[in-house]
C-alpha cells in the first residue's frame, strides 16, 4: 500500500494492513514496521473498527482462486470468496470511506462476485470504473493482465462509464502494446548458480518453457508456482542472443529427429551438453520484483526462502499499474 502511494506520489498514511499470510506480514513489517500490520482474517473487520481508524481509502486484492482459469471457478460458492462478500457488506456501512481500489484476475469481470461488489458500491453511492490492464502498457516488460475497479464518492470521473477500459483514459487504445524497456535493464549482474534450470527440467521440459533474451522487451506473467512448475508460471532467462540460442536448439532438434537417438546414451549426453550451453536460468526474486515495479530499497527478510519470495511475488500486484490508477482515482 505504501509502495502504491509512493509510486503515485500521493501523501497518505496506512492505518491498517491486514493479511492471514504470516510470511507476507513479516515482509511488510521488515520494510515498513510492525505497528500497522495485523495477521487476521478480513472477516473479523467491523464497521466500528474502520470508523475508529478513520480510514478513507480501501485498497484490496481479494483471493483470486475462485475465478482463475486453472481453478474450479466456483465463484461465490467458493469459501475463499467470503472475504470479498464481507467487505461488500461493510462498504455501505463505512461512512469514512471515500475511495476504493480493487484488483483481481482477468475473468473476475464476468463473475457473480463482481456483481455483488458493484451492487455494494452503488448502494453506498460510489462512482466507479473498471479496467483490464497489463504492465506492458506502462512500459514495463512484463505481461500481467488484471481486473481493476476504482470507485469514489466525491464526484464522478470525467471519462465514459458502462464499459471495461482496456487502456488508461487519454491513452491510445492498443491491446497489443509492448514495452520498449529491455529485459537487460532488470537483470542482476552476478547471479548464483542455483538459479540455473536443473538438468532434469532441461532434458524433459525445456521445449515448453518461455525463454527470454536480453534484447527482448517482454516476459510472461509470474505466478506463485514459479520454479516449482515449468509451464505457464513465468519466463526463464538466457544471456545468449536469439540467434545464438536458436542455433543451439536447431542442433537439439536434429538429435530429437534422429530415431536412433532416444536409446543412444551418447546422443542424449550430447543433447544435454547442448542445452547447458544455453545457460538457461530462472529470474531471481529481485528481478521478478523489478518486473513487478517494486523499488530497489524493497527487501525480503534474510529468513524468507526463495520459494516463499516467489510465492509472494506471484500473488502480488504491479506497483506501477496500481500507482497510476491511484492517481486517476484521486484526480480532481
Image (cartoon, rainbow, N blue to C red):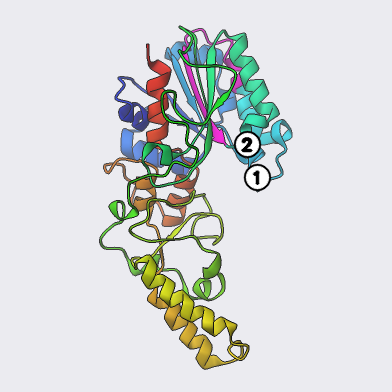
Residue at x 56% of width, y 30% of height: 41
Q: Secondary structure at mark 2?
A: loop
Residue at x 56% of width, y 32% of height: 62
The answer to whether residue 201 is above or below residue 165 is: below
The answer to whether residue 10 is above or below residue 188 is: above
* x and y, in percent, of residue 144 in the image: 49, 43
Left or right position of 112 against 55 = right
* x and y, in percent, of residue 131 in the image: 52, 28
Which residue is more in the foreground, 105 or 78? 105
Q: Which residue is mark 2?
A: 107
Residue at x 62% of width, y 19% of height: 118
The answer to whether residue 188 is above or below residue 158 is: below
Residue at x 40% of width, y 71% of height: 245
Does residue 303 appear in this view?
A: no
Of callouts 1 and 2, which one flags the residue occurring earlier in the amino acid sequence?
1
Q: Quadrant of residue 231?
A: bottom right
Q: Quadrant of residue 246?
A: bottom left
Left or right position of 273 against 78 = left
* x and y, in percent, of residue 252 in the image: 49, 79
Q: Residues within 10 Å of mark 2 (few under 14, many from 20)?
A: some
Q: Secondary structure at mark 1?
A: loop
Quarter of the image for the C terminus: give it.
top left
Which residue is more in the foreground, 78 or 4? 4
Quarter of the image for the N terminus: give it.
top left
- Label total for image: 2
Q: Which residues are magenta?
A: 87-105
Does residue 293 appear in this view?
A: yes
The reply to whether discs 1 and 2 touch (Cβ–Cβ < 8 Å) is yes
* x and y, in percent, of residue 265 in the image: 54, 92
Q: Give the spatial CA distance, label 1 vs label 2.
A: 8 Å
The answer to whether residue 318 is above or below residue 291 is: above
Q: Which residue is mark 1?
A: 69
Amino acid at each position: 500500500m505504501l509502495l502504491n502511494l509512493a509510486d503515485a506520489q500521493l501523501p497518505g498514511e496506512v492505518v491498517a494492513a491486514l493479511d492471514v499470510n504470516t510470511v507476507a506480514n513479516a515482509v511488510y513489517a521488515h520494510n515498513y514496521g510492525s505497528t500497522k500490520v495485523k495477521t487476521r482474517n478480513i472477516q473479523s473487520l467491523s464497521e466500528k473498527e474502520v470508523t475508529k481508524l478513520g480510514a478513507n481509502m480501501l485498497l484490496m486484492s481479494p483471493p483470486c482462486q475462485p475465478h482463475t482459469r486453472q481453478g474450479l471457478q466456483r465463484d461465490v460458492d467458493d469459501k475463499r470468496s467470503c472475504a470479498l462478500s464481507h467487505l461488500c457488506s461493510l462498504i455501505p456501512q463505512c461512512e469514512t470511506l471515500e475511495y476504493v481500489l480493487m484488483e483481481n484476475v482477468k475473468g473476475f469481470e464476468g463473475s457473480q462476485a463482481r456483481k455483488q461488489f458493484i451492487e455494494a458500491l452503488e448502494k453506498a453511492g460510489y462512482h466507479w470504473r473498471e479496467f483490464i490492464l497489463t504492465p506492458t502498457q506502462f512500459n514495463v516488460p512484463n505481461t500481467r493482465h488484471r481486473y481493476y475497479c476504482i470507485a469514489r464518492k466525491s464526484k464522478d470521473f470525467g471519462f465514459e462509464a458502462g464499459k471495461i477500459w482496456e487502456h488508461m483514459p487519454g491513452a491510445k487504445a492498443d491491446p497489443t502494446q509492448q514495452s520498449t524497456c529491455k529485459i537487460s535493464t532488470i537483470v542482476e549482474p552476478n547471479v548464483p548458480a542455483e538459479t540455473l534450470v536443473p538438468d532434469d527440467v532441461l532434458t524433459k521440459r525445456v521445449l515448453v518453457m518461455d525463454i527470454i533474451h536480453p534484447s527482448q522487451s517482454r516476459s510472461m506473467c509470474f505466478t506463485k508456482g514459479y520454479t516449482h512448475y515449468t509451464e505457464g508460471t513465468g519466463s526463464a532467462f538466457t544471456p545468449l542472443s536469439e540467434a545464438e540460442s536458436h542455433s543451439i536448439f536447431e542442433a537439439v532438434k536434429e538429435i530429437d529427429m534422429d530415431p536412433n537417438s532416444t536409446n543412444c546414451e551418447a546422443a542424449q549426453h550430447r543433447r544435454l551438453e547442448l542445452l547447458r550451453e544455453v545457460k538457461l536460468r530462472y529470474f531471481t526474486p529481485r528481478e521478478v520484483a523489478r518486473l513487478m515495479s517494486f523499488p530497489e530499497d524493497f527487501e525480503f527478510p534474510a529468513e524468507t526462502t526463495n520459494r516463499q519470495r516467489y510465492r509472494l511475488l506471484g500473488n502480488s500486484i504491479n506497483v506501477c499499474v496500481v500507482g497510476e490508477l491511484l492517481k486517476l482515482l484521486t484526480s480532481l
